Amino acid sequence: MTNAIRPQPGIENIKLYKGGESRLAGHDRVLKLSSNENPLGPPPVAIDAIRSAAESVHLYPSTDHAELRTAIGEINGLDPNRVICGVGSDEVLQMVTQAYAGIGDEVIHTEHGFSLYPVLIHMTGATPICVAEKERVVDVDAVLDAISERTRVILITNPGNPTGTILPNPELTRLVEGVPENVVLVLDGAYTEYAEGFDGGMSHARNRMNVLMTRTFSKIYGLGGLRIGWGYGCQEMIETLTRIRQPFNLSTVQLSAAEAAVRDREWVAACSELNAEQRARLTGAIRQLGISCDESSTNFVLARFTDAVEAAAANAALQENGIIVRAVAGYGFPEGLRITVGDAEQTGRVIAALTRWRETA
Ligand SMILES: *Cc1c(COP(=O)(O)O)cnc(C)c1O
């Protein structure tokens, strides 16, 4: 028997996305610092909302997400009609690439951008154009230079993952102003709440017809397992994305939990404060051990060792201590380990393990 069926162009080019590991053989008290999850877990108000929502799961969920969009609008000072909610921000990123790019088009992303982007671009049949970064920061000139007649969408992670770096606001403005009006610029702000003095690109999305900001409940809101994210753009773009959004993409449980979480401002304040403290401590300790580490605007740091061999040795030492971090060779950093910032005790474990490794190596 021969197989005559063929997937659409692009699909065979997709390399499967790899998530962070969560298991280590021989360890039962594993500390998972590989997926940038919130060490404090989900906010208690969200857990209560999930419990109450469980009572009504025989009913179909809202298709317009009005209550969640209203809450997001109120808290962030946005017009709820310009907000779209998705199954993680991943789905919003998928909707925008699918809506605006296809076979024969080009979609730009940067060297160390989110590893999901090439997957999403190939799904549409478009060609990914990967642009180099400069000293681990998005290079605005290089992105602008890469724009061609065929460019339809540009995907920018800011702050970056796995770099943790952020484009200074004036640079971001220069990027926004340099992108032609017929090209969609997506600002993926998954880590916005951890970046002091940054609005995630909200003001640009407010003022420009071609800018979409994406945000998530997976990081500071501690709801990664529930899969909720959102996007903010001009009303026409949101209406376009809504046409291809599944009408029941978000469950009653997701909608209720996200609404409770977004209204819990104290939670965000407490989590970002803890993160800033422990991030400074971890960054300082890593540098003290002679390992390179940029200033991070996220809830992780990128430790850069001398080379891939040294990074592998440090990774092995962490694993011996039951700590899982992310090896980021696949993101262009064979010499790097991305370490999620945990709470005080967890950060202490990481520092102790790295210090012991340095002393014995
Ligand atoms: C974690 C992350 C997201 C969020 O994805 P969700 O689908 O909302 O869980 C988006 N972009 C980047 C760069 C991320 O690191």
Image (spheres, helix red, strand yellow):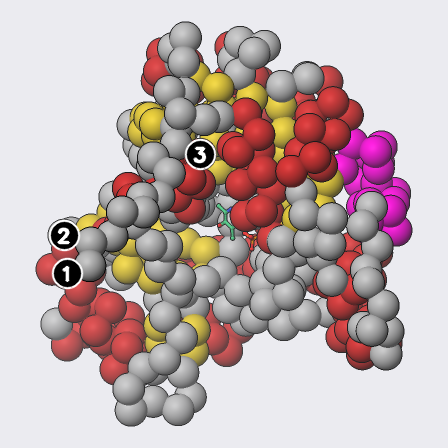
Assess whether residue 243 is covered by the magenta stretch: no
Left of 113 or right of it: where is 190? right
- Can residue 158 be spotted in the picture? no
Q: Which residue is disc 3 drawn over? A: 124
Q: Secondary structure beneath disc 1?
A: helix
Q: Residue at x 20, y 59 (%)?
A: 1
In the image: residue 124, left or right of residue 67:
left
Q: Nearer the viewer, residue 88 or 32?
A: 88
- Residue type of the residue flagged with mark 1: Glu
Residue 295 to residue 360: above or below:
above
From this view, report whether residue 288 is shown above or below residue 41.
above
User: Mark 1 and mark 3: span between their CA atoms?
Assistant: 39 Å
| Residue pointed to by mark 2 | 307
Label 2 SS: loop
Q: Percent position (x, y) of residue 250? A: 71, 57
Seen from the viewer's position, the closer of residues 149 and 269 is 149
Residue range highlighted in magenta: 65-83
Place of residue 163 in the rendered image (x, y in percent of width and height, measured from the top left): 38, 44
- Left or right: residue 313 versus residue 77 is left
